Amino acid sequence: MPLGKPVQVLEDWLRGQPGGYLHPNVHIESDETHGVHWRASGAVEPGSRIATVPHSIALSYLNALADESLPVFQRRRKEFKIEAIGFFYLMLQYVNSATSFWKPYIETLPQPGEEYTTPLWFDEPADEAWLRDTDALFTTKKLKAIYEEQYSSGVSILKASGIDTEPLTWDLFRWAITMFTSRSFSSRSITPQDSKYWTTYKTGSDGRRQTVLMDMSHVPSADLDFSVLFPAMDAANHHHTAKVDWTFDPGRFSLTCIQGIEPGQEVHNNYGPKANDELFIGYGFCLADNPSDTVLLTLKPPPEELQHTLRQAHSGFFFEDGTWNGDKATFKLRPAEQNLISATSAFEHLPEPLLELLTQMVRFDRGLPFATLPSISQYLMDPRSHGRRYLPFIARMIVTSLAPKYQKLQGGSTTLPSSPQNAKQKQAKIYRDGQTRILLSTINSLRTSLRVFRPASTEFPQADILRLNPTGSRLATLEEAVTLFMEDSDVMQGFMAGVQANANTSDLEQLRLAGWEEDAWVLLLCYTWLAVTKSPGDGRLEKWIEGLEAEYEPGQLLKPASSVAQGEASSEAGDMMEIVRRAAERLPGLVWEDQRWSEKLIAGFGGRALKNEGFMMMVADEVGREEPRLVMYLHSMRQ
């Protein structure tokens, strides 16, 4: 069929419909480069209406329910998913296009047998390899399983109803899916105003369109969210810079251009900002350097005890039966800024529901009660807020979730050909490269947010540390913490004397290499708390302990009836009490003699704080070589 002829028929058909309109200077054209599209033959003034498509020519599953020539859809509607009704109805219109009301429209659609580049059509292993380890492949496999079940059951129903199903092949079903995903609009475009009746249309015996009112008041709410095809309106190609306005009036859908259009220019529609995964899965193309691109982060289900509380406060994360809904706990992450403006820059682009959920997980892991947080941004990012102390741990949780995903994508890319071999692979490469770029930018941004808590370096000079880290918080090794607190407190001298009395050395590096580092941290935490609460001061050590006391309430462990919820007294705590006793015997008059020392304090405060506030991090040694070191987060160290 010659290019151009079907599109002229479609244009004339739209203009001839009651209520149909296409601007006199805009025409539907077709060529190899742009496909079917709109183009201006003359100037179009700003604010001009470009097109109006009446609801009478729209195509959706409602038309199938109203079509008396295919009563199977109305009679057995509950056996179909509503989207499948739309797919099968479009297939039947294609098979019977010679007599279909939508013949002019169907003949301008991309035809079955053409090459499609949505992942649903990646049948060849060489093509699918470009999707390996991507969210698009995971989503497509899940959708494909759903579609295969819809196809199998739908064909059985139609066959049992006397419909010839031989032409209704799996490839034709996939074609119908592709037409809906790449060209449809939301049912919000035809939602009735203040009425339980939805309007659809059928063709009467005289060939005219007849209005059908459908009472949808008893239909499940999910069945009111469906896809609608608007012939000719979907002919306009998408461009993210096009400035247009959509108007949904009763009975019609109109598009107006905000900017003027010059003669000869293509006239675009704008479907809004879309990430490449949505463009790829739905439309079959991706945009290189897409400013709206995202990567998906899906959180694992929280512990059941936390889920119980979350069900009451955040029911949206759960299915109606109360089970965790992983899809609702999937968040879109945008590319991160690489130049930190502040210590919180890395977090400001992250979705607030993600930040709140991770905050609740951090608090739960620490044995803290569920907190109602009116403003998660203020709670986490205000330097004066207690929640600011959770940012490093939220950063680590996100990096820990994203790093394996990035590594898989990177590793998988090394086995791919150096360049794509066809159109499918070309789009997949754009998508894959974008995912890798966003993952890397997010991981690097969050890791950088952690490095501002380290001592000044060539990467972050002292001036930048002061600007980016207003609270003065630190991520310190044991040696760094002792040195820091030694500067303004004699408490450290007493602590180190106790270490010397037990280990015959005060060389912390030797103790670390001998496996004493964690024990030393636990004892340091307990020793400093006992010292500070015995003789309060206002130095950096006291500020650190003040924050820990608010978080862990070690004083509660001294009460006779107290129980240690986390870090129960263990043999390790007993061994450390022996260290305390030896130090007390050899160093009378120091905090080692404090009667408040106990296994419960060691396990319930020291051990618990180390577990929650400490983690392994790559740290440069004296000659600049990086090695994994245990660091402790010291909150609010600035005086």
Image: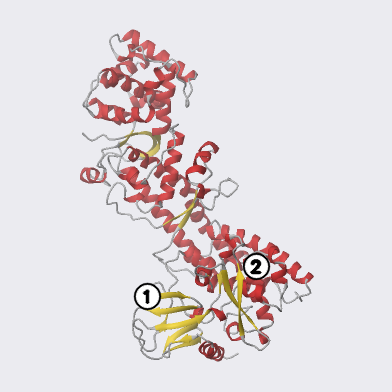
- Residue 575 place in picture, x, y as percent: 45, 16
Residue picked out by circle 1: 243
Secondary structure at numbered mark 1: loop
Name the image quarter holding residue 100. bottom right
The residue sitting at 46% across, 23% down in the picture is 564
Can you say whether 564 is above or below 638 in the image?
above
Give the label on residue 469, or none: none
Residue count near mark 2 (Cα–Cα under 10 Å), binned few <14, some 14–19, many ≥20 = some
Q: CA distance from mark 1 to mark 2?
A: 33 Å
Q: Left or right? Give the position of 163 relative to 312.
A: right
Can you say whether 488 is above or below 316 in the image?
above
Can you say whether 213 is above or below 388 in the image?
below
Q: Is residue 576 visible?
A: yes
- Residue 446 place in picture, x, y as percent: 37, 48
Of callouts 1 and 2, the N-terminal one: 2
Instruction: Name the amino acid, label 1.
Output: Lys
- Residue 171 place in picture, x, y as percent: 67, 72
- Residue 206 place in picture, x, y as percent: 66, 89
Residue picked out by circle 2: 84
Instruction: Name the amino acid, label 2.
Output: Ala
Placement of the C terminus among the 4 image quadrants: top left
Name the image quarter holding residue 363. top left
**Tags 1 and 2 touching, CB below 8 Å:** no
Depth check, front residue: 80 or 201: 201
